[in-house]
Amino acid sequence: MDVRLATEELRAKGIRLTRQRAAVLAALGQAERGLNPEEILALAQSECPELGLTTVYRTIELLVSLGIARRVHTGEGCASVVGAKAEHGHSVVCLLCGRVAEFSNCDMVSVEAAAARETGFTISVHSLELAGTCAQCRASGEAAHTSPGEPRRWA
Amino acid sequence: MDVRLATEELRAKGIRLTRQRAAVLAALGQAERGLNPEEILALAQSECPELGLTTVYRTIELLVSLGIARRVHTGEGCASVVGAKAEHGHSVVCLLCGRVAEFSNCDMVSVEAAAARETGFTISVHSLELAGTCAQCRASGEAAHTSPGEPRRWA
DNA sequence: GTGCGTGCAAATTCTTTGCAATGCA
DNA sequence: TGCATTGCAAAGAATTTGCACGCAC
């Protein structure tokens, strides 16, 4: 996520850039994986110690509604959030380390056409998340499972 | 969802078919849309009045783990559940009435290849949900928006 | 200076757990 | 009959809300 760009967008919309919001943006910007509210709080507090959990929730909602952040439905629950890069993008989650990448060149026309044929629906939106193994984990081999106690399930 | 088939699967695995479980299966079977625990409870209680919410939760977990039901991440929250038809399938949600259909012929190879190229990940799993307008809603035109007070958001 | 944003604490909602009673196989 | 399964109530977690104060613009 481009923190500078996000900052500008807030400013452009007349939304105040407080220290708390900047801290949350920074946390999302530096994280390479989905963060839940608690994690965001912990990360962002290093930059803004008086940040509260309530504000994290409110900021998440704000950023998601503006398209600056995106929710990812994976692993434990659906509360994780990542910074969005592109206007339209999808998350690719690493099943081993939890890292999240984003890809935007999704050509779903043929899949959507097949679905439309099979169900009779007219498809207008798609929600897609992919999962697999990131380059780093592949490189470091099977040995490098990050969290032995916390196997990532796929919801 | 085929209730009879699901019933057989439970029996085959040596899992007891109680009146409560049958009622939950029936509710999922007759519903054409995702149901949250409360809704399942309400529907299933018409068939088994002494059913409790706790059991609904436990049954959902059971059915999902057996692949008999599937969670759908759409609309309000991620707690909705639908009966699954195929071994591997995806939900197609109607944005107007909430009806859920399932389609199974998803050919994601090209999309996954593109994602792999763009992110460097090796893709092994995909989670896909489509949304649009079902045949009925399309037929009854714009006028037929089901719930004016409850616009369905797309998570 | 003016509101928008914030933190705290309380309220609310959602989900899980413990345990004795029940009923399916 | 035996043991998986259930319901209730209570515990626990996650999220939201109310309100007075502080700070960005």
Image (cartoon, coloured by chain):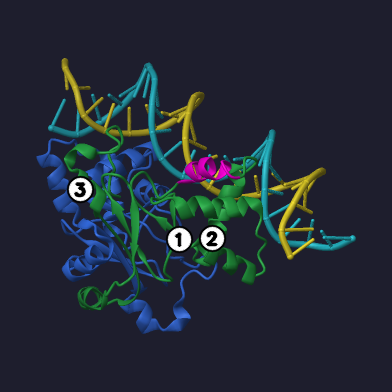
Chain colours: A green, B blue, C cyan, D yellow
Which residue is the site of mark 1?
Answer: A1
Q: Earlier in the sequence, mark 2 or mark 3?
A: 2
Q: Amino acid type of disc 3?
A: Ala
Which residue is the site of mark 3?
Answer: A139
Q: Principal SS element in the magenta part? A: helix
Residue at the (36%, 81%) spot, across then down: B138
Circle 2 chain: A
In the drawing, what numbered circle is on residue A72?
none
Q: Amino acid type of disc 2?
A: Leu
Residue A43 percent across, percent down from the top left: 51, 43
Residue at the (18%, 43%) spot, across then down: A141
Residue B49 percent across, percent down from the top left: 38, 42
Residue density around tag 3, few if under 14, some if 14–19, many if 20 or more, within 10 Å: few
Q: Earlier in the sequence, mark 1 or mark 3?
A: 1
**Element at label 2:** helix
Residue at the (46%, 75%) spot, across then down: B145
In the drawing, what numbered circle is on residue A63?
2
Specify the segment rendered in magenta.
A36-47
Q: Is residue A114 magenta?
A: no
Q: Amino acid type of disc 1?
A: Met
Disc nearest the viewer among 1 and 2: 1
How far is the residue under mark 1 from the one under mark 3? Answer: 25 Å
